Image (cartoon, helix red, strand yellow):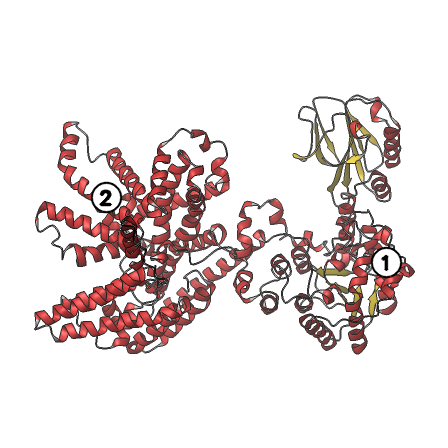
Amino acid sequence: MNFLSYIFLWAFMPLGLLLYWLFPRTKRAYLLLALNIVFYGYYSRRFLLLLLVCVLLAWAGALFIERHRASHLLAKAALAGTLGAGFTLLFVFKYLNFVINGLNAALRAVHMGALPLVELALPLGISFYMFTACAYVLDVYFDRLPAEKNPARLAAFVTFFPTITSGPIQRAPGWFRQLDAQTALRFSRLKKAALMFLWGAFLKMVLADRLAMFVDQVYANVADHHGFILLLAVFGYSIQIYADFSGYSLMALGVACAFGFDLPENFRQPYLESSIASFWRCWHISLTSWFRDYLYIPLGGNRKGQVRKYINIFIVFLVSGLWHGEHVTFLVWGGVHGLYQIVGGLTRKKRDALYKKLNIDCKSFSFRLGQRVVVFVLVSVAWVFFRAQSLRQAMAVLSGALRLDNPWVLFDGTLEAMGLAGREGAILFFSLMTLLLVSLVQRSKRGFAWLEKQGGLFQGLLYGGLLVAILVYGIYGPDYVPSAFIYAGF
Amino acid sequence: MKKLRSVLRLAAFALALFATLDALANVLLIKRTDGIIPMKAFYSQRRDTVDVLLLGSSHIGANLSTAELWERYGIASFDLWGSVQPFWNSYYNLKEALKTQSPRVVVLEMLAATMDWEYSDDARQIVNTEAMHMSLNKVQNILVSAPPERWGDLLTVFPVVHTRYNEITQDDFQYSDRQRMASDKGDISKLYSLSGLGPGDDAAVRQVADVCPLPAKQEKYLRKIVELCRQKDLPLLFLTTYSSQGGRVGAQPAYNRVQQIADEYGIPYLNANLAGEDAGFEQAKHICDDGDHLNYMGARHMADWLGAYLKEHYDLPDRRGDPDFQSWDEGARLDENAFIASIPERGAYFAELTAHRYLYCLIRNNDWEPTPAYNALWEDLTALGFGTDPNTSADCVFALDADGGQRTWEPGANVACEVWGQALNASYETQELLFNGRVVAHMPQRGLMLVVYDPLQQTLVDVTVYAAETEFALTRI
């Protein structure tokens, strides 16, 4: 079930909400679990069993760890066993063929026969719910919360339907606290939920999917394009993936909010950041913080010297790349970001000294704007590896984008034919300006809290305007494939 | 108190939002004449004015002239049809129509009896459902017309219309003008050209004795229509309009089954194919060259034939002259205007013009040698009332006033004149003709342009061009 499907909007959501808020507070976890099963089962019934295995593993593992906390060895073994089993499942479903392909390449080199590939479909949202479950076990191990005795309550958390397919990745302490503290539904909560959902839908349907039409055209035939078209596709994809994924996250946050859960934001205007390091503090925050808390810090973080720190950073980004999929392009994407961080860290002092020597005012608007442009360009270059089907295609895009010898394509109607100029271009431009304006407002006025203080008419016009913009200018209808959220593939 | 205020504010917001979305959907709705516009026009009719309600497919939408029914018999009829309309759409259209109208007769056209499918194609699902106001009828109409995966799209309207934001013109906003829409009586017979098909054999269809069962879903809804009319005590008449030879012979086994059903219920059934030449129908004269429909003359003849039957068998008052039915006068006039603007052949064109009362303006560009073709054109123009041969003057504009007087404007780079209270500008610089600031035609290099204006509707009817290069044949540029 997709957030934008009729079944979700017309049946699941209204009925689910009604039932949920009429249900006795202490029993809501059971209803939530039922809703989660319906939501996930509608997508893929056959992987419900895998989901059940994952929940039972986390439930039993956490209970065992708690009961044997006194014996560090047993607790540690239980932790290793639970996480090992979880990651083995993830490995089998997501990375086995990647490893077999690697082995086959090696076997080919020594003229030996190839191993057969395993035909396994990727269970929807496996990376997200597996990380959620693992984080819960780790939190119990580190004594951040007690192990959940009731498997149904834990299942309700791990399979929480707003986040199960594409995140944000949940943390158990806050989630259970909110489940237990819920009282009655307030109108202000519904209003906030609706706004988040509408703004997310706007980003996805009006902006991301409109850009996707252009970007997909270019990436489908990279050899047919070069220069400015490829350059626009490179930058276009940066906006597209942001609008797509942050749009989805906002819709998930909106849906969760309507059910009484205030989930932490997953994006905080990352393209307004002035460095790659700060970009990563604002992009896919739930995953970044997961890696920080459960990988970077356990690896030693920055506590073991500069060299170890950079090695740790590089490892984290490689793993992050791998988390997105088994393709080598994701690995390179992660590696590029790791290198950005390392080079950035190593050259920081020298850059500061250079600015000082050249008498550059680092607080001036032009300097800060320049920093953001550089970050955007660097991130966009890395996204090429993320978007491309192969390393060869990524290199073709990057080298082609540097051959800027066709400026006429900006004026001769090519862009209009590709949906970047004319009326479609105007819609795109206004959508981008709206995104920029909202991002600036969110950054300086703390977003939704600011909006709640505005007049009713203003709020009404905003809600209505968003809905009308989505209905009229959104990319949807009979030919639209509603499951095409980029992160639903991970 | 605070809670009540919040609820009221929310209700006001929801109402305003619904009204905005409804208006927006209406603007975006595809304004197709084969289903959408008839339904929109139907909602603009005065309550309880439609005496004869016509239902069915294009075989009633294009094959029957409501204007002729009005002008010849004073019958106030409305054609609530849709392209390839199955009986289930006709059924819900009838239910919807009965909310505001109390027809004295319902005429159901029978082409749907030959349609063997569970659902129409995508476009036909839209034209036969989307213009209906949101109601239980609309919901049920959609549920029966489309497969489940299309229900959401059709019920919410926007998924099927929103991509039209690129095509919106001034016209899209004018369909909410109820007064303007009231003169539209649904049919599009005026849009079908005069040219005919080759001769056909009327006897062949009468020899078809086979009976084929109707598709189950069609028969189910045909019977539902019959039951509804019985329940409402509404006289019902089955009708098959005249078709081309191939169509009438192929469809007759289904129509034979319709006859059996009609007999079962005691419903009269008029089959123009069986009446054929006895009723004055001629394939060569009345069938449009698309082979599927009657041409305008055929649609008029069909109306004459049906009107005579209706007048004889039902209590249908002559509504002409009744101020409550003025929109039928306007509709007939607009029908005539639209028909004139579609006539492609000069002889028929001038014959139609001289039969009605219009005002004219003639614009001349350059000189030409008088030829027999030009002389024949000049004769036609003389018949309209022009007194001065334009080829004897320099570039200029001639207009005929309502009182028959002719005015002439002197030549110049731009001849701007006010005729019939409208601004007409013949720009010899850009070689364009502008009517109230809008370009309506391009001048021929050497030749004439004839502007036809309707003083009753105060509207431009047509601009035709007669160029020396094309031997003064009728063209429209």
Badge 1 marks a residue whose secondary structure is helix
Q: Label 2: chain?
A: A
Q: Nearer the viewer, residue B200 or B280?
A: B200
In this image, A247 relative to A315: left or right? right
Farthest right residue? B278
Residue type marked 1: Asp
- Classify B207 as above or below B466: below
The number of numbered discs placed on residues in the rendered structure image is: 2
In the rendered image, the quadrant that contains the N terminus of chain A is bottom left
| Dots 1 and 2 on the same chain | no
Q: Residue at x 36, y 42 (%)?
A: A393
Q: CA distance from mark 1 to mark 2?
A: 81 Å
Do the residues under discs 1 and 2 have CB atoms within 8 angstroms? Answer: no
Q: Is residue A43 left or right of residue B18?
A: left
Bin the neighbour count of mark 2 within 10 Å (Cα to Cα): few under 14, some 14-19, many 20 and up: many
Q: Identify which residue is drawn at 15% across, 72% down.
A: A65
Residue wearing tag 1: B304
Classify mark 1: residues with Cα within 10 Å, few (<14), some (14-19) or many (20+): many
Whether residue B311 is visible: no
Q: Amino acid at mark 2?
A: Ile
Q: Which residue is mark 2?
A: A276
Residue at x 13%, y 48% (from the top left corner): A309
Q: Is residue A405 left or right of residue A66?
A: right
Circle 1 or circle 2, nearest the eye: 2
Label 1: chain letter: B
Residue reaching furthest front? A111
